[in-house]
Image (spheres, rainbow, N blue to C red):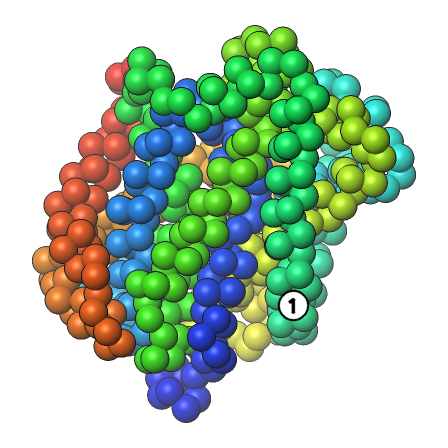
Amino acid sequence: MNTKNQTDTKRSSFTGKIGFVLAAAGSAVGLGNIWRFPYLAAQYGGGIFLLVYIILAVTFGFSLMVAETAIGRKTNLSAIGAFQALDKRFSWVGYLASAVPIIILPYYSVIGGWVMKYIFGFVAGEGSQMADSNFFPNYTSTTAEPLIWFFEFIAITSVIVFFGVEKGIEKVSKIMMPILIFLILFIVIYALLTMENALDGVIYYIKPDFSKFSIMTVVAAMGQMFYSMSLSMGIMITFGSYMKKDIDISKSVHQIELFDTGIAFLSGLLIVPAVFAFSGGDESALGQGPGLMFVTLPKIFNTMPAGNVIGSVFFIMVFFAALTSAISLMETVVSIFMDKAKLNRKLSCIVVFASSLLLGIPSSLGFSVWSKVKILGLQFLDLFDFISNNIMMPVAAFATCIFVGYFIKPKAIIDEVSVNGKFKEEKLFSTVIRFIAPICIVTILVSSILNVFGIIKI
Ligand code: PHE
């Protein structure tokens, strides 16, 4: 990921048609799908959240992913260089987008650490203890252990990026991903057949209840869409720069989107109905936030024969999904340090490792010794999550839309996409990029900021 290597020959590129799709899907599918999507869906009204999410993903998410990929392929540069090359006045967008993974990587690794703790818990046969509702809050409120797991997760990620052995991990996760899908399907079916009240949960999750709609539903769904599809943080631009000219951008984006949304949907179907079943239909159990997956899944595994084995396998696969995403986050940050601070690869890895460690500590301690510290009413992990997903990414996305819509013009992107055949969604693309997305983002950005500062209540 070096912005200096401008020529096709020097710049590394994906091999084969499927290379881009697999790399982008590896980055997209991660904790965002399995951990974040279900708790947001539970919190923000179930079916209505799902509906808003899908509409946003197929219009807005699609258009933005196409735009970013095409910008990368057209310029052969990663985010900062690409915006600079196309229009100097928009260089800041590249910087803003690049700052996002710097914020996400540390807290992502804190959650990766929780996943590792659960793997070892299940492997040690402690599934029934973990099924207790108090296990997760008790665990995260201890100081040292979550920090140690966080450290291990970020250390593993760093070692992989340091030695440049991502390819090996990608190979493993190619096998893991399909198994993960089948396992989720199996557990969903098992849970739905054996649990009481689960059907109420399915209805809550699938059937939109318009009375539960608020602007916060859109705020949350939009933040989730950026996060899950790895948008507005320079990653897709970099991937696009590695993409060969004979690959169909719009078709590839459709495939990534389907895969990403499919896994998020299934994860929600796994977790949301189970919350209903275990709480006896009490809706207040839905608003637990980040702990939802960690509290609910062990309960399901505990009802299953060989629950410890299934739990171990499940969390191992979640770990691999998280690892491939963390690697792509770290790769991006490392490449920024290489390009901008002119550090070599190894040194940048060390700098990124150390700074992520420092930045991640507050997110972890926010559940224990610093649980009283709140900024804007949010504890550290939620604060980092909010700033990156609900402020920085929408601003970067807005600027990208204005840039594409009114400066380089949609035609520049359409031409790039049409290199291999007709861009069927051309009209949708220009309309979304020029009008719908910018208006949507501004409304949402302003209202979510006013909400956090308590000026309006939504
Ligand atoms: N998309 C990843 C997920 O859903 C998270 C991620 C965000 C990865 C940004 C890379 C970059 O978990």
The crowd level at tag 1 (other Cα within 10 Å; few <14, some 14-19, many 20+) is: few
- Looking at the rendered structure, the kind of residue marked 1 is Lys
Q: Which residue is mark 1?
A: 171
Q: Nearer the viewer, residue 195 or 383?
A: 195
Image quarter of residue 64: bottom left
Q: Quadrant of the C terminus?
A: top left
Q: Is residue 101 above or below residue 116?
A: below
Q: Is residue 207 above or below residue 155?
A: above
Image quarter of residue 160: bottom right
Apparent side of residue 383 relative to residue 346 in the rendered image (left or right): left
Which residue occupies the extreme right position in the image?
A: 124
Residue 279 in picture, x, y percent from top left: 63, 12
- Residue shown at 78% from the left, 39% from the top: 310
- Residue shown at 63% from the left, 9% from the top: 280
- Residue shown at 16% from the left, 42% from the top: 436
Q: Nearer the viewer, residue 189 or 347?
A: 189
Q: Is residue 215 above or below residue 101?
A: above
Tag 1, which secondary structure?
A: helix
Apparent side of residue 183 relative to residue 99 in the rendered image (left or right): right
Residue 105 in picture, x, y percent from top left: 54, 50
Q: Is residue 131 above or below residue 143?
A: above
Apparent side of residue 458 relative to residue 103 in the rendered image (left or right): left
Residue 232 in picture, x, y percent from top left: 35, 53
Image quarter of residue 292: top right
From this viewpoint, is residue 63 visible?
yes
Q: Nearer the viewer, residue 61 or 116?
A: 61
From this viewpoint, is residue 136 visible?
no
